[in-house]
Image (cartoon, rainbow, N blue to C red):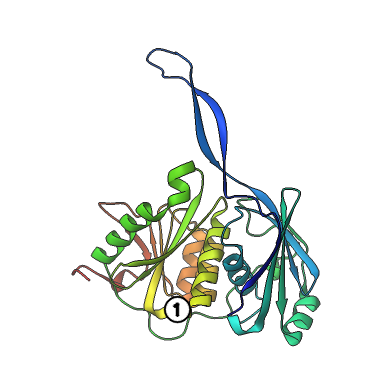
Amino acid sequence: MTDPETAGDVPAPTTIAEAVTFAFADAVPRPLSRAVATEVPVQVLFGGVPFGIMMATPADLEDFAYGFALTEGVVADAAEIRAVAVDGAAGAVRLGIDVTGARLQTHLARKRAMTGRTSCGLCGVDDLAALPRAAAGPPGAAPRVALGAIGRALAALDAGQDLNAATRAVHGAAWATLDGTVVAVREDVGRHNALDKLIGACLRAGRDPASGFVVVTSRASFEMVEKAATFGCRTLVAISAPTALAIDRASALDVTLVGIARRDSVTVFHGAERIAADPA
């Protein structure tokens, strides 16, 4: 595990905005101050070579570095990252990721330019063959997950989203143990960024991907399935519905895919036989 080297001024994850609110009942303007989520360009460099620019919330950036490097296929595990440098200047952030020499050479041979919008996970891909895909499904048998565990994780994720509680403008991703205990939450204005941050946090903490499951507050697009599978996670729970391609990829990679997760019900699109009705 490496410690990030931080230089310059990295913006705060929230700022205060002045606004006016109107109630439909009386149409009276009422001034208020409220926290809003910060969104800044984060330039990612591998070995000093620019890779792309992502719009992200400037928090947990070292976790983002690890998760992004893994899910983009630049590294295969945390040990191949030697250092992370975070440099803030002029309302932007440079995220320098130093990887081992062999990995850097492989990366440079396949490098794609990427300028990422907040919601985008595929910006800069100009060839279908370059779509990021997990090479194979995670190893081992997928674990059974109890409905009660999913319910506990959903409730804990809502309570653990401090940034969203302040801004109501960010996505969350959580890592829960198989009994539904949430042990890590990461947030970002971009759903892909939140998941990359979570995966990075799990990598740095040495968590076993088979020991729990991921819960996200977004739809389950195919990129979210790919990222989870690349980490080695066998179960993905999403608040919203999946896309058809996400279901296809979950089936191909044998990742249990749970969508439309609510307090009173869930819908399982792949791996329903692994969802246990009994309490965890």
Q: Is residue 260 visible?
A: no
| Percent of width and height locating residue 81 | 66, 79
Q: Nearer the viewer, residue 133 or 201?
A: 201
| Percent of width and height locating residue 189 | 56, 50
Q: Quadrant of the C terminus?
A: bottom left
| Percent of width and height locating residue 204 | 53, 76
Q: At 75% across and 77% down in the image, what residue appears?
A: 107
Q: Nearer the viewer, residue 151 or 128?
A: 151
Q: Is residue 113 visible?
A: yes
Instruction: Look at mark 1 in the image and give the residue it sits on.
Output: 207
Find numbered disc 1 in the image and state the secondary structure of the residue it sits on.
loop
Q: Determine whether, in the image, residue 77 is placed left or right of residue 138.
A: right
Residue that sits furthest to the left in the current view: 278
Q: How many marks?
A: 1
Q: Amino acid at mark 1?
A: Arg
Question: 142 above or below 228?
Answer: below
Q: At 28% across and 52% down in the image, what residue appears?
A: 263
Q: Nearer the viewer, residue 110 or 118?
A: 118
Q: Determine whether, in the image, residue 108 is placed left or right of residue 271.
A: right
Q: At 30% across and 76% down in the image, what residue appears?
A: 144
Q: At 79% across and 82% down in the image, what residue appears?
A: 105
Q: Can you tell which quarter of the image residue 130 is in?
A: bottom right
**Mark 1 burial class by Cα count in 10 Å: few <14, some 14-19, many 20+:** few
Q: Quadrant of the N terminus?
A: bottom right
| Percent of width and height locating residue 88 | 71, 56
Q: Can you tell which quarter of the image residue 84 is in?
A: bottom right
Question: 222 above or below 120?
Answer: below
Q: Nearer the viewer, residue 48 or 151?
A: 48
